[in-house]
Amino acid sequence: MALLVTGKQLTTPVWIGILMLMGIVTKNAIMPVEFAVESIRVGKPREEAIIDARMKRARPIVMTTIAMAAGMMPSALAFGAGGEFRSPMALAAIGGLLFSTVLSLVFMPAMFMLMDDIGALFWRFGSKLVITERRERSAGEGSCLRA
Protein backbone atom coordinates (compact mmCIF):
# COMPACT_ATOMS: atom_id res chain seq x y z
CA MET A 1 0.00 0.00 0.00
CA ALA A 2 2.84 2.39 0.86
CA LEU A 3 4.40 1.75 -2.54
CA LEU A 4 1.11 2.41 -4.30
CA VAL A 5 0.56 5.65 -2.41
CA THR A 6 4.07 6.93 -3.20
CA GLY A 7 4.13 5.60 -6.76
CA LYS A 8 7.25 3.46 -6.25
CA GLN A 9 7.91 0.20 -8.05
CA LEU A 10 8.24 -3.29 -6.60
CA THR A 11 11.98 -3.93 -6.95
CA THR A 12 14.50 -6.39 -5.51
CA PRO A 13 15.31 -4.19 -2.48
CA VAL A 14 11.57 -4.11 -1.71
CA TRP A 15 11.55 -7.92 -1.52
CA ILE A 16 14.52 -7.77 0.84
CA GLY A 17 12.56 -5.33 3.01
CA ILE A 18 9.55 -7.63 2.96
CA LEU A 19 11.69 -10.56 4.11
CA MET A 20 13.03 -8.45 6.98
CA LEU A 21 9.51 -7.37 7.79
CA MET A 22 8.28 -10.97 7.94
CA GLY A 23 10.65 -11.76 10.80
CA ILE A 24 9.57 -8.77 12.86
CA VAL A 25 5.87 -9.37 12.21
CA THR A 26 6.22 -13.02 13.18
CA LYS A 27 7.93 -12.08 16.43
CA ASN A 28 5.21 -9.53 17.18
CA ALA A 29 2.53 -12.18 16.68
CA ILE A 30 4.17 -15.17 18.38
CA MET A 31 5.32 -13.50 21.59
CA PRO A 32 1.87 -12.42 22.88
CA VAL A 33 0.24 -15.68 21.81
CA GLU A 34 2.88 -17.70 23.66
CA PHE A 35 2.46 -15.44 26.69
CA ALA A 36 -1.32 -15.99 26.63
CA VAL A 37 -0.96 -19.77 26.24
CA GLU A 38 1.36 -19.92 29.25
CA SER A 39 -1.11 -17.85 31.31
CA ILE A 40 -3.94 -20.19 30.30
CA ARG A 41 -1.86 -23.20 31.37
CA VAL A 42 -1.32 -21.59 34.78
CA GLY A 43 -5.09 -21.33 35.18
CA LYS A 44 -6.13 -17.85 34.01
CA PRO A 45 -9.36 -17.60 32.03
CA ARG A 46 -8.74 -17.35 28.30
CA GLU A 47 -10.12 -13.80 27.82
CA GLU A 48 -8.16 -12.48 30.79
CA ALA A 49 -4.98 -14.17 29.57
CA ILE A 50 -5.31 -12.65 26.09
CA ILE A 51 -5.98 -9.16 27.44
CA ASP A 52 -3.08 -9.46 29.87
CA ALA A 53 -0.75 -10.69 27.13
CA ARG A 54 -1.69 -7.80 24.84
CA MET A 55 -1.27 -5.23 27.59
CA LYS A 56 2.15 -6.56 28.59
CA ARG A 57 3.43 -7.05 25.02
CA ALA A 58 1.95 -3.87 23.47
CA ARG A 59 4.76 -1.60 24.66
CA PRO A 60 7.61 -3.68 23.16
CA ILE A 61 5.68 -4.09 19.91
CA VAL A 62 5.03 -0.37 19.60
CA MET A 63 8.62 0.45 20.59
CA THR A 64 9.96 -1.89 17.90
CA THR A 65 7.71 -0.29 15.31
CA ILE A 66 8.70 3.25 16.26
CA ALA A 67 12.42 2.40 16.31
CA MET A 68 12.31 0.64 12.95
CA ALA A 69 10.18 3.34 11.29
CA ALA A 70 12.38 6.13 12.65
CA GLY A 71 15.53 4.30 11.60
CA MET A 72 14.23 3.83 8.06
CA MET A 73 12.87 7.34 7.65
CA PRO A 74 16.10 8.80 6.17
CA SER A 75 16.15 5.97 3.61
CA ALA A 76 12.45 6.46 2.86
CA LEU A 77 13.02 10.15 2.21
CA ALA A 78 15.93 9.23 -0.14
CA PHE A 79 18.60 11.21 1.71
CA GLY A 80 22.21 10.57 0.74
CA ALA A 81 23.88 8.74 -2.09
CA GLY A 82 21.83 5.87 -3.48
CA GLY A 83 18.74 7.01 -1.61
CA GLU A 84 16.50 6.44 -4.63
CA PHE A 85 17.56 2.79 -4.63
CA ARG A 86 16.76 2.20 -0.93
CA SER A 87 13.65 4.37 -0.72
CA PRO A 88 11.12 1.76 -1.94
CA MET A 89 12.49 -0.83 0.51
CA ALA A 90 12.18 1.58 3.42
CA LEU A 91 8.68 2.67 2.40
CA ALA A 92 7.52 -0.95 2.14
CA ALA A 93 9.05 -1.78 5.53
CA ILE A 94 7.56 1.27 7.26
CA GLY A 95 4.10 0.68 5.76
CA GLY A 96 4.24 -3.00 6.60
CA LEU A 97 5.37 -2.30 10.16
CA LEU A 98 2.55 0.15 10.79
CA PHE A 99 -0.06 -2.18 9.32
CA SER A 100 1.28 -5.25 11.12
CA THR A 101 1.39 -3.41 14.44
CA VAL A 102 -2.30 -2.59 14.17
CA LEU A 103 -3.05 -6.16 13.13
CA SER A 104 -1.01 -7.70 15.93
CA LEU A 105 -2.64 -5.54 18.58
CA VAL A 106 -6.23 -5.76 17.31
CA PHE A 107 -6.62 -8.74 14.98
CA MET A 108 -4.43 -11.34 16.73
CA PRO A 109 -6.48 -11.56 19.97
CA ALA A 110 -9.66 -12.10 17.97
CA MET A 111 -7.96 -14.66 15.74
CA PHE A 112 -6.49 -16.43 18.79
CA MET A 113 -9.94 -16.78 20.34
CA LEU A 114 -11.46 -17.96 17.05
CA MET A 115 -8.77 -20.58 16.48
CA ASP A 116 -9.00 -21.70 20.11
CA ASP A 117 -12.76 -22.19 19.69
CA ILE A 118 -12.25 -24.11 16.44
CA GLY A 119 -9.60 -26.27 18.12
CA ALA A 120 -11.95 -27.00 21.02
CA LEU A 121 -14.71 -27.92 18.56
CA PHE A 122 -12.44 -30.34 16.71
CA TRP A 123 -11.27 -31.76 20.04
CA ARG A 124 -14.87 -32.46 21.08
CA PHE A 125 -15.70 -34.26 17.85
CA GLY A 126 -12.32 -36.00 17.72
CA SER A 127 -12.57 -37.25 21.29
CA LYS A 128 -16.04 -38.65 20.58
CA LEU A 129 -14.65 -40.53 17.58
CA VAL A 130 -11.78 -41.93 19.64
CA ILE A 131 -14.08 -42.99 22.48
CA THR A 132 -16.52 -44.61 20.02
CA GLU A 133 -13.62 -46.42 18.30
CA ARG A 134 -12.33 -47.71 21.66
CA ARG A 135 -15.79 -48.93 22.66
CA GLU A 136 -16.20 -50.78 19.36
CA ARG A 137 -12.78 -52.40 19.73
CA SER A 138 -13.40 -53.48 23.30
CA ALA A 139 -16.85 -54.82 22.37
CA GLY A 140 -15.35 -56.71 19.43
CA GLU A 141 -12.55 -58.15 21.56
CA GLY A 142 -15.01 -59.23 24.24
CA SER A 143 -17.13 -61.13 21.73
CA CYS A 144 -14.05 -62.92 20.36
CA LEU A 145 -13.04 -64.02 23.84
CA ARG A 146 -16.49 -65.44 24.55
CA ALA A 147 -16.52 -67.55 21.42
Image (cartoon, rainbow, N blue to C red):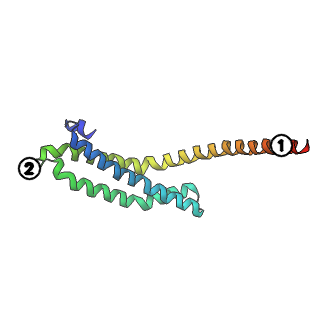
The residue indicated by pointer 1 is 139
Q: Position of residue 132 (x, y in %)?
A: 75, 42
**Given the current orientation, which residue lies at the most extreme right position?**
147
Q: Considering depth in this image, is 61 or 25 the residue closer to the camera?
A: 25
* Camera-nearest label, 1 or 2: 1
Q: Which percent across, then down, holds residue 92? A: 25, 44
Res. 97 visible in picture: no
Give coordinates of residue 48: x percent, y percent. 54, 58
Please identify the quadrant where the C terminus is shown.
Answer: top right
In the visual, does 143 lie left or right of 51? right
Mark found first going from the N terminus, 1 or 2: 2
**Nearer to us in this view, 21 or 131:** 131
Q: Would residue 133 appear left or right of 26 to someone viewing this image?
A: right
Amino acid type of disc 1? Ala
Crowding around mark 2 (Cα neighbors within 10 Å: few <14, some 14 to 19, many 20+) is few
Which residue is found at the position 28% from the left and 56% from the top? Answer: 66
Residue type for callout 2: Ala
Res. 81 mark: 2
Please name whichever residue, 85 or 145, is drawn nearer the observer in this view of the structure: 145
Dot 1: few (<14), some (14–19), or many (≥20) neighbours within 10 Å? Answer: few
Q: Residue at x 26, y 55 (%)?
A: 68
Circle on res. 36: none
Q: Judge whether residue 83 can be spotted in this image.
A: yes
Identify the element where label 2 is drawn: loop
Residue at 27% of width from left, 58% of height from top?
67
Residue 58, x across and y down, in percent: 40, 58
Q: Quadrant of the N terminus?
A: top left
